[in-house]
Amino acid sequence: ADNSAQLVSVYPNPAADRVTVEILADNEDDYVVEIFNSLGAKIGTVYSGVLSQGTTKLDYSTAGLAKGVYVIKVGNQGAYQTIRLIKE
């Protein structure tokens, strides 16, 4: 039963030293937002907890990341959405 569709955008992309992860949740629920490197290793958690219904903007510092390709994964109720992020 996946009735918790989510719309996720990440900007700026390519990123320099900060990104914003914007999540549109259709109802209040638990979310986890994680960032992985190109090898698939988790390198950080952007957010873990309850998001309220509507749009939430999460700021994350990418200043310490090496240049390259990363994946931001947003999970909710066992469903995941992934967005490719480029760090310049």
Image (cartoon, grey):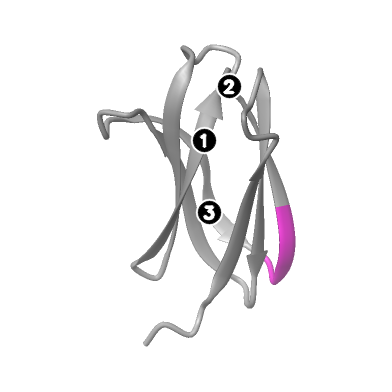
Residue range of the region highlighted in magenta in the rendering: 52-56
Which residue is at a point 37% across and 87% down the rendered structure image? 1
Q: Is residue 88 left or right of residue 58?
A: left
Give the vertical position of 51 relative to 46 (above or below): below
Residue that label 1 marks:
85
Q: Tell me the CA gap for discs 3 and 1.
A: 22 Å
Residue 86 drawn at (x, y percent):
52, 29
**Label 2 secondary element:** loop
Total count of labels:
3
Q: Is residue 73 left or right of residue 15?
A: left
Amino acid type at circle 2 is: Thr
Q: Nearer the viewer, mark 3 or mark 1?
A: 1
Q: Is 37 contained in the magenta span?
A: no
Q: Nearer the viewer, mark 3 or mark 2?
A: 2
Residue 59 drawn at (x, y percent):
68, 36
Residue that label 2 marks:
62
Can you tell which mark lies on residue 58? none
Residue 54 drawn at (x, y percent):
73, 69
Badge 3 crowding class, 10 Å Cα cut-off, few under 14, some 14 to 19, many 20 or more, is few
Which residue is at a point 68% across and 66% down the rendered structure image? 52
Amino acid type at circle 1 is: Leu
Residue 45 drawn at (x, y percent):
46, 36
The reply to whether dot 1 and dot 2 touch (C-beta < 8 Å) is: yes
Give the vertical position of 52 relative to 32 (above or below): below
Residue that label 3 marks:
49
Quarter of the image for residue 68 reads top left
Q: Tell me the CA gap for discs 3 and 2.
A: 21 Å
Amino acid type at circle 3 is: Gly
Which residue is at a point 27% across and 34% down the rendered structure image? 40
